[in-house]
Image (cartoon, coloured by chain):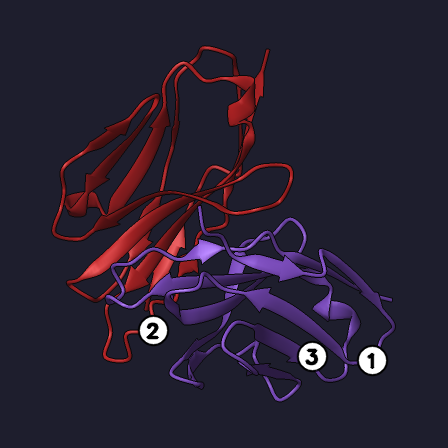
Amino acid sequence: AQKVTQAQTEISVVEKEDVTLDCVYETRDTTYYLFWYKQPPSGELVFLIRRNSFDEQNEISGRYSWNFQKSTSSFNFTITASQVVDSAVYFCALSEENARDTGKLIFGQGTTLQVKP
Amino acid sequence: EPEVTQTPSHQVTQMGQEVILRCVPISNHLYFYWYRQILGQKVEFLVSFYNNEISEKSEIFDDQFSVERPDGSNFTLKIRSTKLEDSAMYFCASRSLGGVTDTQYFGPGTRLTVL
């Protein structure tokens, strides 16, 4: 059964602090895909990153970085030098490659990040 | 940049009424989805649609729900007889042909309020 767990419900930091959002997943598939989406107060879901299960290279995009570790089934997201505009709910999601190839996303509960000035 | 659009942005309806939520996916995409998010909760998969048929649906997607692609551009979600618990944000998403590796892009959502 597939499952995504984001144990941190809410995180509050002061601007310029670094913050890491945790994501742990469960799947029986050997091929799967992991995603992070941002949901700002306006409500839309903004795609941040996709990672496939065969690519464990960490990725950096500006102030954002992602650490994928299959050994611990984790796909953590770090924001360096956080800014007030980073305040949002962040969702980690999993998609399995199954016979039907529907590509449905299984989301975690989300982590609400509040960055204070 | 192409984007998924949804109308209306907010729909208020009385319990028992039918509602149709509309989505225009990105034009070259072939896989379409509906998700819902009850206020303060996680995003939940409802249904996926490919080649003019449902490819997968969740337990939430019962007989009250239906989807349709009535023309080459629109993708609709119909709730036949709304209940109070259907109040939620409904997101449409689409992705291009190319396997599950392709990314799903989401619309801005329709907030449904059932009174």
* Mark 3 vs mark 1, CA separation in Å: 8 Å
Specify whether residue B37 is in view: no
Query: Relative to the observer, which residue lies in front, B28 or B40?
Result: B28
Circle 3 residue: B79
Circle 1 residue: B17
- Host chain of mark 2: A
In the structure shown, which secondary structural element does the residue marked by tag 1 occupy?
loop
Q: Residue type at mark 3: give it.
A: Ile
Query: Relative to the observer, which residue lies in front, B72 or B98?
Result: B72
Quarter of the image for the C terminus of chain B: give it: bottom right
Query: Relative to the observer, which residue lies in front, A101 or A4?
Result: A101
Q: Residue type at mark 2: give it.
A: Thr
* Residue A102 tag number: 2
What is the x, y in percent for residue A91?
A: 45, 45
* Mark 2 vs mark 1, CA separation in Å: 30 Å
What is the x, y in percent for residue B31?
A: 39, 71
State which chain is coloured purple: B
